[in-house]
Image (cartoon, rainbow, N blue to C red):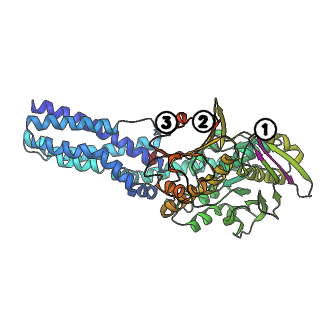
Amino acid sequence: MDIVLWCIWIVTYLVGAVWYELYIMHMFQQNSYKPREYSEWMRVTSNVGRMLGKTLYAFFSLPLIAIGNMGCMVTAVFMNVLTIIVNAPHKAKKPLVYTPRVKRMLVTTIILFSVVTILSLLAGENADNIIKAPTLVLLILFIMIPFEVLLANLINHPVEQGINRHYINDAVKILGQMPQLIIIGVTGSYGKTSVKYFLSRLLSVRYSVLHTPGNYNTTLGVVRTIREQLKPYHEIFICEMGAREVGDIKEICDFVHPKHGIITSIGPQHLQSFHSLENIISTKFELADAIGADGYVFLNYDNEYIRGRKTDGNIVSYSAVTDGTDYRAYDITVTKDGSFFKIKDKDKKEYEFHTRLVGIHNVQNIAGAIAVANTLGISMDKLIYPVKQLESVPHRLQLIRRGEQTILDDAYNSNKAGFMAALDTLAMFDDLRILMTPGMVELGDKQYDENKEAGIYAASKCDYAILVGREQTKPIQDGLAQAGFEASRMIIVDTVQEGFNMINAIHSDKHKVILIENDLPDNYN
């Protein structure tokens, strides 16, 4: 009977361990497979608590099975069942993708786990010891799963480097066969995806254009786009370049060799991995450093960190606020039906534009796209209609009308400048204005101050604030309170769905306009 119970215990223990392993692998993937960034994530207090919660029942199960009597073994099995429950996969915003790399890492961790377990079993001299000998080892292995993932990544590193190098060389070969291809790099702390889509639409008036899809803005994402989608007939390749560490953008530039580049913005985003604003600035300008003498660097001069930075490239500046730039949007009127503005070309001839998109920052991003398209030979009058046809990029202040509610979906990674711009857009509406947000993340030691400032700013822009997460949103709560926002209009919930339930419960004769600002990634939930 002991052997039967022990076998049941082993099966339930392994199921719990596998679920926990997949959770940790998911977090490693969410942190871009970067050991330093993943290690930073592990040190966050809330994440430490989450991992302890997922291993708690194993602390009870393993000592109980070591005692060995019937009652303890039954209880130990029950503890394993609880471990399975707390580690069972749940619906994620961005589920674990079983890429070849993930599969290789899982195989490596299974081998490590199995080898250590078998060695501990072989240490037993009799049946009783065989049952008891590995329990301490199994406890250690379970607790150490977050570090086993790092070890597996280290072991696999030479293999991954070789595979990546093969893919990169293949992409370089494809690019080498298209010497006439114009490559435009797009980077920035925020706005780069919107500018990429806007620019692709405007350049398509004259050219055959390919852009990196979705969030394919890492080295391997760019490589995959080139290998799978770039065709001989493409004339322009718009390459979005993301970064979480110094050197990330240079790594992409070193093999795509962009002819032109556009830097949309710079701000204190991903400070947890960059550690300083100066590191962010220098990393974004790795794109400018890669542009040759025959290329142009398009810079958003509304951004103080960009405007104050020197570069050796041929600069074309654009703005929606700052005077004296090469392409400046002015006479801007923003309404619920869209935005109206004017821009002059290099010959100082004036053109009027209308877009269905709302918000000054959308005008700013469109101005950047117009600057590139016009510089590359498309006349301003041919850009008027495409600008009018531009659509919102999903989750980037996307306007969604739903019955008696209007949603401003700005759920993609938030930053202070974007947060405030979205609040300005919310304030335009004469309806019941509701902010729903979990706040901003990945801001390092500036996280409290940045969120508190956003709370202070929000106080005069919304009628209700739905804050997702009591501890997560504490800085915003403090900012709202400091600005005199009524406590009765500050509603704290645990989930977005609960937030919508509270919104539906608010009684008002007015139409409800809801700004969803940021949606925490899975590694913050």
> In the picture shown, does residue 81 fall above or below 279?
above
Q: Is mark 2 on a helix, strand or loop?
A: loop
Residue numbers of the magenta segment: 334-344
Q: In this image, 283 relative to 298: left or right?
A: left
Question: Between residues 176 and 142, which one lies in front from this camera angle?
Answer: 142
Answer with the quarter of the image where residue 295 lies. Answer: bottom right
The local crowd at label 2, few if under 14, some if 14 to 19, many if 20 or more residues have their Cα within 10 Å, is: few
On-image quarter of the N terminus: top left
| Membership of 199 in magenta stretch | no
Q: Which residue is drawn at 33% across and 42% down?
A: 20
Q: Is residue 241 visible?
A: no
The kind of residue tagged 1 is Gln
Q: Which amino acid does label 2 sit on?
A: Ser
Residue 497's disc number: 3
Are the residues tagged 2 and 1 within 8 Å (C-beta)?
no
Marks 2 and 3, the one that precedes in the sequence: 3
Taking 268 as reference, is 225 above or below it?
above
Circle number at residue 508: 2
Residue 330 location in percent, x, y?
A: 82, 55
Residue designated by label 1: 389
The amino acid type found where label 3 is placed reads: Gln
What is the x, y in percent for residue 497? 49, 36
User: Quick one: SS at disc 1?
Assistant: helix
Q: Quadrant of residue 293?
A: bottom right
Q: Nearer the viewer, mark 1 or mark 3?
A: 3
